[in-house]
Image (cartoon, grey):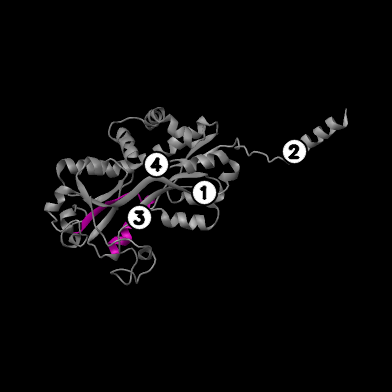
């Protein structure tokens, strides 16, 4: 072998040895959490099926909305596609402050979760949407079990939301009754609306309910962060939560180890983006038209191939 060839081989060998190794995704399953409302199931399946198309091993794991953070911190769970500013911000901030969980940015959807009533209830409680009207006409929202107090139908307990605390802080003559499931919550709204029966309950957006039904969210004192932590804030100087729920983005979060173990999934999740109108349309197909979640997801992915392939870098 000539000196020039030997030198060339040596240089090439040095280059190969010193070149950075490109990280590959682990073959282990990346675990995406599933919760108990339709929109979150859709969001998660959209991301999960896109990751599968890239060749990743994806596992869907049912988990409680707020309790899931314990698993995200330890790495037993890996990705949560919907943390709502309205109900999950405190838990998310606590988790990310540990360094064990990372906020991967906004989903593109904007969240509202608040007390909501059908438009026909304004005839019985004309001061609405001002929250103080509820003090004068609570009995108009009562049931046989709560009378003379009004009944507020809240979401499942696992959703958080501080409705019980809000009732106490604002001295509202209401009892909070929690629906067992997302389906039960909106089945009761459907029934009440058809009968023009009294109801005030948790309604959120993006969702089909505030599109299908005419109604309004209650105007509580505007939320500020201090409302949830400082009793001196607001109209009740001895209690927290004397305000509305926050409004804002729906976030994506992940175990902090995702970026090293599944680097391409990490980047894809950060790029995921969908808006309220798109999500509302898909939820409608599942909840009102009776289509399967998997079929709705597949239909969207077929119609938006360039979009989700952009998420996964293809």
Identify the mark nearer the N-term, 1 or 3: 1
Q: Which residue is mark 4?
A: 40
Q: Quadrant of residue 275?
A: top left
Q: Residue pushed farthest left?
A: 123
Which mark identifies residue 161? 3
Identify the mark nearer the N-term, 1 or 4: 4
Residue 151, how many percent across, how many down?
A: 23, 54
Q: Residues within 10 Å of mark 1 (few under 14, many from 20)?
A: many
Residue 252, how many percent across, how many down?
A: 45, 46
- The label nearer to you, 1 versus 2, is 2
* Mark 1 and mark 4: Cα distance apart in space: 17 Å
Identify the mark nearer the N-term, 3 or 4: 4
On the rendered image, what quadrant is the N terminus found in?
top right
Residue 78, how many percent across, how many down?
A: 52, 44
Please name whichever residue, 308 or 67, is drawn nearer the observer in this view of the structure.
308
Specify the segment rendered in magenta. Answer: 148-168
């Amino acid at each position: 072998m000539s000196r020039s060839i030997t030198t060339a081989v040596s240089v090439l060998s040095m280059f190969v040895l010193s070149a950075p190794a490109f990280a590959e995704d682990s073959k282990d399953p990346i675990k995406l959490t599933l919760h108990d409302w339709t929109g979150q199931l859709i969001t998660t399946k959209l991301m999960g099926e896109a990751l599968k198309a890239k060749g990743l091993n994806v596992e869907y794991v049912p988990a409680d909305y707020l309790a899931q953070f314990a698993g995200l911190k330890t790495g037993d769970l890996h990705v949560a596609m919907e943390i709502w500013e309205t109900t999950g911000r405190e838990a998310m901030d606590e988790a990310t402050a540990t360094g064990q969980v990372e906020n991967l940015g906004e989903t593109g959807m904007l969240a509202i979760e608040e007390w909501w009533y059908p438009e026909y209830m304004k005839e019985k409680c004309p001061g609405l949407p001002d929250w103080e009207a509820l003090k004068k006409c609570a009995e108009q929202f009562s049931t046989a079990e709560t009378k003379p107090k009004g009944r507020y139908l809240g979401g499942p307990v696992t959703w958080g939301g501080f409705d019980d605390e809000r009732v106490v802080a604002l001295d509202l003559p209401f009892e909070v009754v929690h629906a067992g499931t997302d389906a039960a919550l909106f089945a009761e709204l459907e029934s009440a609306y058809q009968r023009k029966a009294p109801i005030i309950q948790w309604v959120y957006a993006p969702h089909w309910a505030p599109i299908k039904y005419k109604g309004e969210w209650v105007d509580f004192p505007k939320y500020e962060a201090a409302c949830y932590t400082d009793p001196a804030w607001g109209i009740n100087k001895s209690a927290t939560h004397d305000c509305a729920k926050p409004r804002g983005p729906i976030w994506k979060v992940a175990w902090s180890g995702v970026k090293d173990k599944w680097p391409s999934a990490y980047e894809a999740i950060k790029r995921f983006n969908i808006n309220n109108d798109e999500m509302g349309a898909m939820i409608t197909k599942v909840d009102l038209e009776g289509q399967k979640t998997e079929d709705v997801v597949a239909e969207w992915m077929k119609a938006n191939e360039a979009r989700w392939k952009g998420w996964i870098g293809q």
